[in-house]
Image: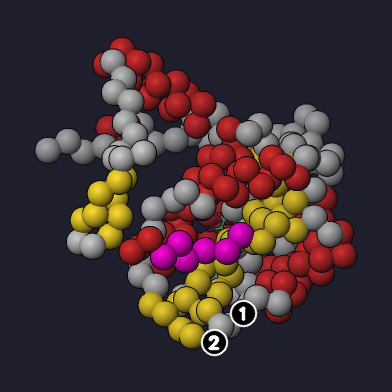
């Protein structure tokens, strides 16, 4: 591969395969059609999924762009039933308090169409949990370094993670128990990492139902200038 130096740093030629306009049209629309079939699913089957599939899903998420290419993320893949159980117990404890004391009435009303409550059986039933941590700063051998746009970077990586889960033929729910510090403790994560998102991953339960929701029409989300 052809290599040159720019700013004193190595650069390689961009591998770029120019598609025809027809191919672009077909690809853009067929990707939309596939992504538009994604649904958040809380009824996750306990059927096992090959570990290699989850690894490749995480590989995909880790291709996300990040501030100054610091890649400020850690993806914990959990299949150990004991650890899943500990996570479920801790998450449900927080959710129980949230639903009964912390969430205002408006919020609970807004969640009625989704039929959620404090119980999170999917945290034990799903064959895998992926706990995503953001690295607020770098920490290697006790030496701290700066990370940039951490929330944006990890958010983008999670979008790609969710897309990869869907396109692999699996389902998930973006679970964000609040507070989530228990995850750091249970998984023994270092001080520079903060829990960001918890995703149970697996097949949907047979005959699962999801809320009958509609997406906003394009003209509401797209403004042309
Ligand atoms: N974290 C809670 C509540 C919840 C909040 C929102 I905003 C949602 O879109 C869904 C749920 C729970 O997981 O039940």
Residue 15 locus on image (x, y percent): 34, 34
Residue at 78%, 40% (x, y): give it.
Answer: 49
The residue tagged with tag 2: helix, strand or loop?
A: loop
The residue nearer to you, when weighing 137 against 31, is 137
Above/below status of 16 relative to 188: above
Residue 101 locus on image (x, y percent): 64, 76
Q: CA distance from mark 1 to mark 2?
A: 11 Å
The residue nearer to you, when weighing 47 against 121, is 47
Above/below status of 120 relative to 144: above
Residue at 56%, 40% (x, y): give it.
Answer: 164
Part of the protein shown in magenta: 70-75
Residue 48 locus on image (x, y percent): 83, 41
Above/below status of 98 relative to 216: below
Give the number of the disc on residue 18: none
Q: Residue furthest left?
A: 225
Split into 4 quadrants, where in the image is the N terminus?
Answer: top left
The residue nearer to you, when weighing 189 against 178, is 189
Label 1 environment density (alpha carbons within 10 Å; few <14, some 14–19, many ≥20): few
Residue at 57%, 48% (x, y): give it.
Answer: 59
Give the number of the disc on residue 142: 2
**On the rendered structure, is 40 left or right of 222?**
right
Q: Are marks 1 and 2 in contact (CB under 8 Å)?
A: no
Is residue 161 in view from this perspective?
no
Q: Which residue is mark 1?
A: 190
- Image quarter for residue 188? bottom right
Picture colour scheme: secondary structure
**On the rendered structure, is 170 left or right of 195?**
right
Is residue 201 in view from this perspective?
yes
């Amino acid at each position: 591969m052809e290599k040159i130096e720019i700013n004193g740093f190595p650069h390689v030629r961009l591998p770029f395969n120019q598609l025809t306009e027809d191919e672009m049209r077909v690809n853009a629309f067929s990707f939309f059609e596939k992504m538009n079939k994604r649904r958040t699913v809380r009824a996750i089957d306990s059927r096992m999924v090959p570990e290699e599939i989850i690894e490749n899903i995480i590989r995909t998420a880790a291709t996300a762009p990040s501030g100054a290419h610091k890649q400020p993320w850690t993806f914990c893949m959990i299949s150990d039933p004991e650890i899943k159980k500990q996570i479920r117990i801790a998450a449900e404890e927080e959710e129980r308090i949230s639903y009964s004391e912390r969430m205002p009435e408006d919020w609970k009303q807004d969640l009625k169409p989704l039929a959620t409550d404090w119980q999170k059986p999917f945290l034990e039933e799903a064959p895998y949990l992926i706990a995503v941590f953001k690295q607020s700063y770098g920490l290697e051998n006790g030496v701290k370094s700066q990370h940039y746009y951490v929330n944006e970077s990890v958010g983008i990586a999670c979008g790609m993670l969710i897309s990869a889960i869907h396109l692999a033929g699996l389902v998930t729910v973006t679970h964000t128990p609040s507070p989530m510090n228990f995850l750091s403790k249970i998984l023994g994560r270092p001080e520079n990492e903060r829990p960001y998102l918890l995703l149970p991953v697996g097949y949907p339960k047979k005959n699962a139902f999801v809320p009958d929701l509609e997406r906003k029409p394009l003209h509401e989300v797209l403004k042309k200038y």
